[in-house]
């Protein structure tokens, strides 16, 4: 039985590599602060990622499932209430009651971006790439290698070759990580060295920027990750305590019976 279990685990772990290749090329493993059972989001990194999303990504991508108030909640970028209100006021939303456009409030969500040439919504992009966590959703790749949605986003953003081609009146850009398009993607390269300027003096090379925005999109997909992990710690602790209590209770209940058998 032990050999069968080991064989099944090995087969599943080895089977995750072909899935990675078929879903989106060779995904690079990246060390994110939120990985593992004790990992948490890096507040400074999320703020930098928000800046990249705002200045670059938001022109073509929305995040319609993410409430703006989450920017000030614990475990996220943790902007001050004034910063959240200011950020929200710079975004507009059509109000049917007013029959006109108005500045967004913190109770509103991030905008939806639609129209020709616009990209997919990024609210759950990092979680939508769940196929990269292992075969048939077993999560082995993420368990052993930490490879998941953020790594996929990072790899796409850093795998442009600079080559382009025109096909059926549309331009495509070579990106070896995007095998669904046979290595060609409609989105042009967005992340370059020093394309944004950080106030905190953090590195602004393309790889650092890609890592920051990938971490932010992971938070957008799962803003309650830290709270979920804390709830998991408490649950495990309670199970351990319960197991100990059950063990001693069992010994106490069966002690008279075992004593009679010995006699």
Image (tube, rainbow, N blue to C red):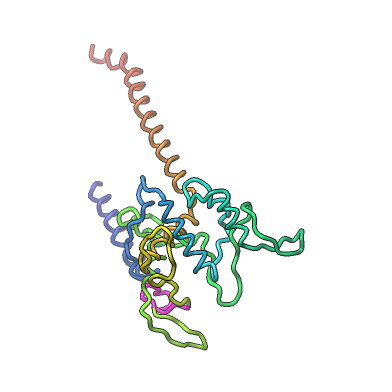
Q: Is residue 178 above or below residue 141?
A: below
**241 or 61: which is nearer to us?**
61
Q: Is residue 185 magenta?
A: yes
Q: Is residue 1 magenta?
A: no
Q: Which residues are magenta?
A: 175-186
Identify the residue at the far top of this view.
263
143 with respect to 74 (left or right): left
Task: Report x, y in % for residue 41.
Answer: 41, 51
Occupied quadrant, residue 197:
bottom left
> Residue at horizontal 70%, vertical 63%?
94
Q: Is residue 42 above or below residue 239?
A: below
81 with respect to 236 (left or right): right
- Assign the C terminus to one quadrant of the image: top left
> Residue at horizontal 25%, vertical 51%?
6
**205 or 68: which is nearer to us?**
205
**220 or 15: which is nearer to us?**
220
Occupied quadrant, residue 181:
bottom left
Task: Report x, y in % for residue 27.
Answer: 34, 66
Task: Report x, y in % for residue 61.
Answer: 54, 68
Task: Report x, y in % for residue 135.
Answer: 37, 60
**18 or 203: which is nearer to us?**
203
Occupied quadrant, residue 103:
bottom right
192 with respect to 113 (left or right): left
Residue 245 seen in the current view: yes
What is the number of callouts on the image? Answer: 0
Residue 152 seen in the current view: no
């Amino acid at each position: 039985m032990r050999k069968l279990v080991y064989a099944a685990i090995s087969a599943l772990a080895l089977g995750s590599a072909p899935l990675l290749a078929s879903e989106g090329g060779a995904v690079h493993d990246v060390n994110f602060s939120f990985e593992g059972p004790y990992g948490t989001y890096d507040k400074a990194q999320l703020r930098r990622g928000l800046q990249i999303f705002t200045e670059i990504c938001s022109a073509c991508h929305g995040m319609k499932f993410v409430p703006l108030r989450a920017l000030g909640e614990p475990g996220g970028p943790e902007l001050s209430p004034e910063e959240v209100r200011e950020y929200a006021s710079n975004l507009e939303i059509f109000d049917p009651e007013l029959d006109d456009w108005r500045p967004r409030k913190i109770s509103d969500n991030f905008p939806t971006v639609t129209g020709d040439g616009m990209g997919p919504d990024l609210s759950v992009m990092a979680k939508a790439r769940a196929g990269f966590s292992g075969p048939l959703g077993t999560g082995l790749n993420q368990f052993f290698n930490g490879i998941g949605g953020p790594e996929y986003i990072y790899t796409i953003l850093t795998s442009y070759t600079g080559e382009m081609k025109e096909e059926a009146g549309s331009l495509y850009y070579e990106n070896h990580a995007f095998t669904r398009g046979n290595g060609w993607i409609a989105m042009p390269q967005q992340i370059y060295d020093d394309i944004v300027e950080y106030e905190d003096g953090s590195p602004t090379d393309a790889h650092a920027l890609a890592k920051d925005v990938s971490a932010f999109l992971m938070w957008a997909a799962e803003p309650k990750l830290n709270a979920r992990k804390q709830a998991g710690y408490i649950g495990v602790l309670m199970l351990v305590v319960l197991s100990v209590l059950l063990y001693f209770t069992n010994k106490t209940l069966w002690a008279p019976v075992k004593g009679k058998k010995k006699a």
